[in-house]
Image (cartoon, rainbow, N blue to C red):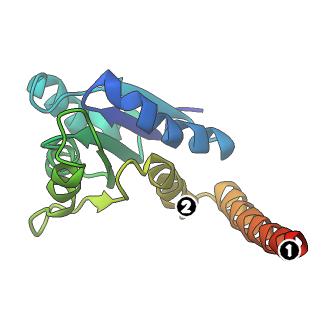
Amino acid sequence: MGKKISIVMGSDSDWNVMKAAADILDTFDIAYEVDVVSAHRTPEKLYEFATNAHTRGIRAIIAGAGGAAHLPGMVAAISPLPVIGVPVKSRNSIDGWDSVLSILQMPGGVPVATVALNGAKNAGILAAQIIAAGDDAILDKIIQYKQTLKEQVAAKAEKLKTDM
């Protein structure tokens, strides 16, 4: 089975956040690839990646970036695929707000689905849901995952009541 999701980040230092996307895709048995693609330091690689991802069987892209966070928007400007941006609070970040706003405030015609600061897990879930729109086996896994969340909340509520 080919890779369906691409997880890219501006720096390898973002992996500690972006790994959560890979972990949740593993849960759903969705194949993915991981790479470092810097919008500022490797613009040629960015262009090649964004231009060709769909021709390699990729169906959605998760792009994480900190600081100025141009990677998700630049990928979305070039690629025809859905792009999910993960703002990463990096060491040079202004409390993460610079990353959030850089990814969130895209101009009309260049959408980037944006998750919470350091919200790579949700990016992985959203990518899985995108794949699930055309894959009943993945859809069933998403339905089961949401049922598990519901059951976990019910168990926590019951535990809280018995511990009081």
Which callout, 1 or 2, points at the residue further toward the start of the chain? Answer: 2
Residue at (53, 60) in percent of width and height:
129
Report which quarter residue 133 is drawn in. bottom right
Residue 119 is left or right of residue 154, and the answer is: left
Q: How many marks?
A: 2
Foreground residue among 117 and 26? 117
Residue at (59, 44) in percent of width and height:
24
Which numbered circle lies on residue 135? none
* Residue closest to the far front: 164
Foreground residue among 113 and 131? 113
Report helix, strand or loop for mark 1.
helix
Residue 40 is left or right of residue 89, and the answer is: left
In this figure, which residue is indicated by the disc labeled 1?
A: 158
Q: Position of residue 65 (x, y in %)?
A: 25, 40
Residue 57 in view: no
Alpha-carbon neighbours of circle 2 within 10 Å: few (<14), some, or many (≥20)? few
Query: Relative to 12, does residue 57 appear above or below in the rendering?
Result: below
Q: Position of residue 127 (x, y in %)?
A: 47, 53
Residue 125 is left or right of residue 62, and the answer is: right
Quadrant of the drawing holding the N terminus: top right
Query: Relative to 101, does residue 86 appear above or below in the rendering?
Result: above
Given the image, on which type of amino acid does mark 2 rest?
Gly
Foreground residue among 149 and 56? 149
Q: Measure how far apart labels 1 and 2 are at the Cα level.
A: 37 Å
Foreground residue among 108 and 135? 108
Q: Position of residue 50 (x, y in %)?
A: 22, 38
Residue at (20, 37) in percent of width and height:
51
Quadrant of the drawing holding the C terminus: bottom right
In this figure, which residue is indicated by the disc labeled 2?
A: 134
Given the image, on which type of amino acid does mark 1 rest?
Glu
Query: Relative to 18, does residue 148 appear above or below in the rendering?
Result: below
